[in-house]
Amino acid sequence: MSNYEQTVFISYAWGGEREEIVDQIDKALQKRGIKITRDKRDLEYKGSIKEFMERIGQGSSVIVVVSDKYLRSPNCMFELIEIAENKRFHDRIFPIVLADANIYDPVKRIEYVKYWEGKRSELAEAMKSLDPANLHGIRDDMDLYDRIRDNISGLSSVLKDMNALTPEMHKDSDFEVLYNAIDKRMKKKTAASTAKGQKSSKADKPKSADGGVSVNKIEIGGNVDGKIIIGNNNRIND
């Protein structure tokens, strides 16, 4: 398995309690041997933010720290949608839901949909004041707002159905449950990768014309009489 497949990413909104719990998760998992890839440490100066977010979206294991700010952030929502669109969303994410993330109340979830509808309408109105030729790049923002508006209700419903425990429970256990879940996922991926490699190795092994195994230019096989044949002319058990 490649190092990339074993990489653990974290998706979160900067600042406040959000940053504090991310630092705690980072420390707790690193001391157990799991390194987290996070933007503030692993996105180099002048590196592409979008490409880094796309990497998160492709990650096999992604810790998602869900907060009110996260659900209102274009970048965070881009990451969440990318994760979902790369399939196996439930298997690949490990959510930590903060108290201010209003995903458990349907009325509050509707407010998030309205928020993104409002952001889209605001941008659409502003775009009317410009010549279409001058909207290069702005249309990408509009497309993102459309994606978020169309997906936030469904994704927040999936998140609220997952037993994410409370931040306090995670802190009290020093994130032991989170570690165990990620470790289990990584071991499962390793086992699947090993099995796939062994299957591929067997499939690639060259065969001789009579069904024997070919080793370089020497063939070991058998004929219809049950005799072992080595090479073309040497026989054993005549």
Image (cartoon, rainbow, N blue to C red):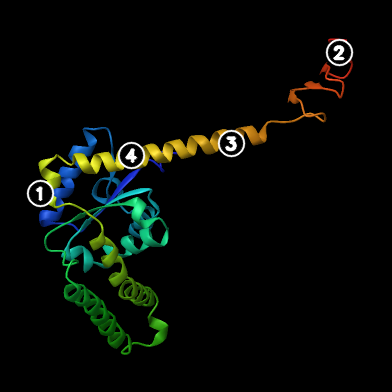
Three-letter amino acid code at the position of disc 3: Lys
**With 227 as the anchor, is 187 left or right in this view?**
left
Residue 69 screen position, x and y as percent: 17, 65
| 221, 128: nearer the viewer | 221
- Using a 10 Å C-alpha cutoff, classify the residue at mark 2 as few (fewer than 14 neighbours), some (14 to 19) or many (20 or more): few
Q: What secondary structure is found at the residue carrying circle 3?
A: helix
CA gap, disc 4 to disc 2?
52 Å
What residue is shown with label 2?
A: 235
- Answer above or below: position of 35 versus 144: above
Alpha carbons under labels 3 and 2: distance apart:
32 Å
Res 168 label: 1
- Considering the numbered disc 1 on the image, is that residue within a helix, a strand or a loop? helix
* Label 4 residue SS: helix
Looking at the picture, which amino acid does disc 1 mark? Glu
Q: Is residue 149 left or right of residue 110?
A: right
On residue 199, the disc is 3
**Mark 3 or mark 1, which is nearer the start of the sequence?**
1
Mark 1–mark 4 distance (CA, rounded to whole Å): 22 Å
- Give the foreground label among 2 and 1: 2
